[in-house]
Image (cartoon, grey):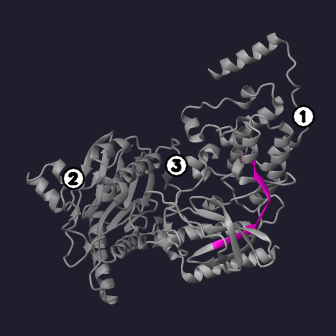
Amino acid sequence: MATQQNCALPSGFQLDHYRVERQLSLGGFSIVYLAYDQDGTPVAIKEYLPNSLALRAEGEVTPHVTEAHQGAFRYGMKCFFEEGRALAKLVHPNVVRVLNFFRANGTVYMVMQFERGRTLHDYVQKNKGNVRERFIRGVFTRMLNGLREVHAHKLLHLDIKPSNIYLRADGTPVLLDFGAARQTLMSDTPILKPMYTPGFASPEQFTNRDALGPWSDIYSVGASMYACLAGSSPQRSDERLKHDTVVPATKAWYGQYSPHFLATIDWCLQLDPLKRPQSCFALQKVLAQRHREAPPQQKSWLEGLGTKLRTMIGRS
Amino acid sequence: MRFTIFQESRVGKRRTNQDRVAYSYTRDALLMLLADGMGGHLYGELAAQISVQFIAQSFQQEAKPKVTDPVLFLSRVLSNAHHAILDYAFDKHLSDIPRTTIVACLIQDGVAHWAHAGDSRLYLIRKGRLIAQTRDHSRVQLMLDQGLLDAESAAVHPGRNRIFSCLGGSHPPQIEFSRGTPLGNGDVIAMCSDGVWGPLDTNTLVKALSDGKVMESVPRIMNEAEELGGPQCDNMSLIAMTWHDDNPGDIPDTVSTRTMPFDAVTTQMEGFGRGKRDQEDLSEDEIERAIREINAAIHKFK
């Protein structure tokens, strides 16, 4: 099926009692808008609009769903409800807050608190190669507080990645987008393929969905931390199973970050779920440990050469 | 009695799964069933469900812990299942009588008997070789037998799904019975619907099942059939059983009935509506209710 681009609702559109300001993001499953409620408070509204099933042409409001796709569209809606249900029960400073849920224009909408700031992804791109260890430890320790809450509600996030971690203006992280969490409850053959971002998904997400657990989210956390250093995600885990080309963090950034921190990342990125930290708490405990960062490189040139050589050998 | 058994049924790319599989065993007897409701007719799924349920029930009533005569038992229950479908259609004033293929296999005293109507198949594999196979009750098979068709053109023949014998429907079924076949250690009996044997050729199936590790091979075969079935993939069902000697050697995942009480029966059967894609179930009311629930949760935790 050719992927089609859905048109967003126009600016100024009155949606229930919210006024649409602009589109914030466009995904395969939904569109997110910035809107204002009656009191002028900004909110983020997520519109259920899977672009493989529903099409909204320019200037239209109600998306067109063909008869053949009606069933799948409704099924996807169920998934969207699962996300709503999951988030509605979660009240945590590090998890995005749902404010309202309503039906309009032949589809459904989820209203969430609007957070000012930027995604971790943007931050990493801007500060490429220069993201401090203390910063990463801080962000992820606090983000894991939110993830713990998610796990405590018997949910899995399953789509943790830097672009789903939002940094408020004060630097506190918020976990966004629980779109993938829905899959945990669906045992039937999903017609809408589970959605995840390849480089951040654990191997069991590709192959053995029965083996999913907190450790699967931990893998994604590890991949996200890795991406903070590398600027991009590690190799897809399903390809890693066949031919692993990921350079362990302990090798790739030797000397630039504390060995303890790099070893923690590698620990999360183990392909065997049992070899990873088994819970958020276990990982948090390690991340929260204060370790002095590696001193800036003041080694003799000979030592430096040795390191370089070692890295090169490690890579080849 | 000692065996390893695994069954699986998938909807494929169809809207409903009209296949039914079941097995049932007592201390001394094992019954395996597979029915493929006929899609071109109304309520194929009903016919399959009625047959499987009816036959399994009869087995549970009569196998204490063995049936008296396997052939008579099969003959009676299959023809009774046929009448059960007719009765159902009559009671409900159905405009067309539902139809289904059937293949049933009963094992007791180390001897297997099977019977079938239609084009669902049974294979008996011994030491990697195909020992016995049911012959489809289809026009294409007849033409093959008469040399009017070769295997290649049969595989693509437009009428290859047309069968002349089934349970239900307006004609009495022509049921074919096997001879009693003694089983040896490691023998594999596999039964499948045309959704499985259609896309895969017999050699592939036999090869895949030869090692007797049915727990692994069945899902693998199903995956393969589903892949080859492509966007039009039919319902697929496969039930496979490996027979073991009664020696106490420990083989993982086997069922040993030696410790079962005389009057106990274990049955594995999927209920109705299973495999049906439930995405269409979401009604207007349910949408409204879901939204109400979510909002209630939001306000409760605010």
Q: Check disc 1 and report the residue beneath it.
A: A291
Q: Over which residues does the magenta segment extend? A: A109-121
Q: Is residue A114 magenta?
A: yes
Left or right: B82 in relation to A209: left
Amino acid type at circle 3 is Asp
Residue beneath label 3, please?
A: B253
Instruction: Please name the residue shown 61% across and 70% down the image.
Output: A10
Chain to which mark 2 belongs: B
Residue at horizontal 62 percent and vertical 43 percent from the top: A199
The answer, for residue B233, to whether it is visible in the render is no
Q: CA distance from mark 2 to mark 3?
A: 36 Å
CA separation in Å, label 1 and label 3: 49 Å
Residue B230 shown left or right of residue B71 in the figure: right
Residue that appears at 75% across and 42% down = A126
Residue B70 coordinates in the image, percent (x, y):
31, 63
Query: Where residue A309 is drawn, which disc sits there?
Result: none
For badge 1, the amino acid type reads: His
Q: Amino acid at mark 2?
A: Ala
Q: Position of residue B192 (x, y in %)?
A: 34, 57
The crowding category of the residue bearing disc 3, from other C-alpha atoms within 10 Å (few below 14, some 14 to 19, many at least 20), is few
Is disc 3 on the same chain as disc 2? Answer: yes
Report in which chain the residue with disc 3 lies: B
Write the residue at 79% across / 77% down: B299
